[in-house]
Amino acid sequence: MSPNSENINTLLEWCLEGRQSAQMEVYNRYYKAMYNISLRIVKHSAEAEDIMQESFLKAFTKLHTFKGEVTFGAWLKRIVINNSIYHYRKQQQRNETSIEDKLYKVEDNDGIVSDHESTKRKAQKVMETMSRLKDNYRVSLTLHLIEGYDYEEISEIMDISYANCRTMISRAKESLRKKMITA
């Protein structure tokens, strides 16, 4: 049976045995989502790509520590988020300025806009507005609203207290609302 048709647990067993085809299949199943997670945090395509690659390397070398208490995807996601935040903080310490984000415009086809296009346009506006928030607001909202982490998990990831996390996310939401109104 080919690795493509195998479930993730079998693939992980094969990865532990050193089968490169299984590692490639796991990579192919998860790389897009992991890249997007990293990109939303570090806001730079090449850096997100590097972080994603490093995260997969770390996951494969530490696979023996994966206990299956959560899904593999959730375990890998945590590695990617931790690496992304680490790189983001390192970049901030060096006071590097990030390259401007490219804004992708949804084209209007002769004024006729479907519900899907309208929803897509609204989501794009929210994402563009989020990218203009203060960095700690942007990261906390991304983790909460997009990645689905709860306050406790975010406070642990960002190394802040639970109360600070709740306050920061509340303020981030309010800041996002204000920017959406003026945008």
Image (cartoon, grey):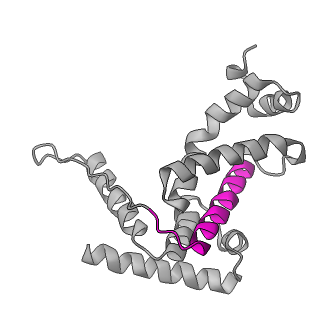
Front residue (pair 102, 78): 102
Residue in the foreground of this view, choosing between 175 and 17: 17
> Which residue is painted at 25% across and 49% down in the image?
106
Picture quadrant where residue 178 is located: bottom left
- Please say if 91 is above or below 177: above
Question: Is 23 left or right of 17, judged from the image as shown?
Answer: left
Q: Quadrant of the N terminus?
A: top right
Query: Which quarter shows the C terminus?
Result: bottom left
Q: Quadrant of residue 57?
A: top right
Res. 109 image quadrant: top left
Instruction: Name the residue rendered at 52%, 81% in the picture.
Output: 170
128 is higher (above) or lower (below) than 151: above
Query: Can the viewer see residue 64?
Result: yes
Q: Residue shown at 64%/68% (left/top)? A: 90
103 in relation to 52, above or below = below
Task: Name the residue at the left extreme.
Answer: 110
Q: Is residue 91 magenta?
A: yes
Report whether 109 appears left or right of 86. Answer: left
Residue drawn at x 65%, y 68% is 150
- Horizontal placement of 158 versus 182: left or right? right
SS assignment for the magenta stretch, majority = helix
Exactly how many numbered labels are in the figure? 0
| Magenta extent | 73-98
Residue 126 position in % (x across, y down): 37, 64
Residue furthest to the top: 1
Image location (x, y in percent) of residue 145: 53, 64
Q: Is residue 73 visible?
A: no
